[in-house]
Every structure is written in C-alpha cells, then in structure tokens.
Amino acid sequence: MDCIFCKIIKGEIPSSKVYEDEEFIVIKDVNPQAPVHLLAIPKEHFASVAELNDERAVVVGKMMKKLAEIGGDNGLDDGFRIITNKGKHGCQSVSHLHLHLLGGRQLDEKMG
Ligand code: DGP
C-alpha cells in the first residue's frame, strides 16, 4: 500500500519519533504549524474517523491520552489543541487516520 504513514511506521521513511508502543506512534509533523506540532498515528491502517469501530476507538482514546501527557511534558501548561481532519472539506491530506497536537502559542479562536 502506498501510504506515507505506513512507510514511516515500517521505518522505510525517516521521522522524528517521540513515542512508540505496539499500537501507535507519535512523530513530529514535517510541516509544523505551531511551535509544538505532533502527529499520533495508529499502526493499523485505516483512513479516518469515519472508519472507527469499537477496537479502533479504544486505540484513538489512548492516542489522545498520550498526546495530552506529551503536551504536559513539553510545557504546554497554557493549553493545546488536538484535532483530526477527515476528507476534502476537512483538508485531510494523508488518508491514514492521525491526530494533530498543536501548541506552544496562542491558537486561532476560529477553527474553520
Ligand atoms: P492532514 O492534512 O490532517 O492529513 O495532515 C497530514 C500531516 O502530515 C501534515 O500536517 C503534514 C504531515 N506529513 C505529511 N508527510 C509527512 C512525512 O513524511 N513526515 C512527517 N513527519 N509528517 C508528514
């Protein structure tokens, strides 16, 4: 499968990995939009939140928990944002579900 995140997970493409366990990885975004911009990516390939089932939802919950922990470890005491994009209107560019953690500056009030 020609998926850039699957290649990163397999180690075929280098990344700045900040966390890994048997279910997901956390890497630095190659095109950061905030001083801290991380991506949590499940090792199982599926396209987006529209393909969640109960088992995948548990993993995504663990990903959110880990991102919040990492945010605390990175001094994001004033807050941060966790988002996931889906499809064309959501501006999803990589069709492998991922969560963005953005922080380290005042983020825009408008999210659209
Ligand atoms: P989205 O637009 O929600 O699908 O976000 C995809 C993000 O993935 C985008 O912020 C840039 C990031 N990205 C794309 N290719 C790579 C890569 O090869 N390495 C890393 N670290 N991030 C990537």
Image (cartoon, grey):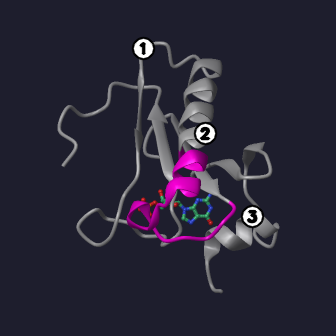
Give above or below for 61 relative to 22.
above
How many numbered marks appear?
A: 3
Percent across and percent down for residue 44 are 66, 66
Residue 82 quadrant: top left
Disc 2 crowd rating (10 Å Cα; few below 14, some 14-19, many 20+) is some
Kind of residue at disc 3: Ile
* Image mark for residue 88: none
Residue furthest out toward the top: 77
78 left or right, relative to 91: right
How far is mark 1 from mark 3, CA to CA?
A: 31 Å
Disc 1 crowd rating (10 Å Cα; few below 14, some 14-19, many 20+) is few
Compare marks 3 and 2 and give the one earlier in the sequence.
3
* Image mark for residue 62: 2
* Image mark for residue 9: 3
Q: Residue at x 58, y 16 (%)?
A: 75
6 left or right, relative to 56: right
- Looking at the rendered structure, the secondary structure element under dot 3 is helix
Q: Nearer the viewer, mark 1 or mark 2?
A: 2
Q: Which residue is drawn at 53% across and 37% down?
A: 64
Q: Does the magenta-highlighted stretch encompass residue 112?
A: no
- Looking at the rendered structure, the secondary structure element under dot 1 is loop
Nearest the viewer among 44 and 10 is: 44
Percent across and percent down for residue 102 are 45, 37
**Circle 1 residue:** 78
Give above or below for 65 relative to 27.
above
Magenta stretch in the rendered image:
43-60
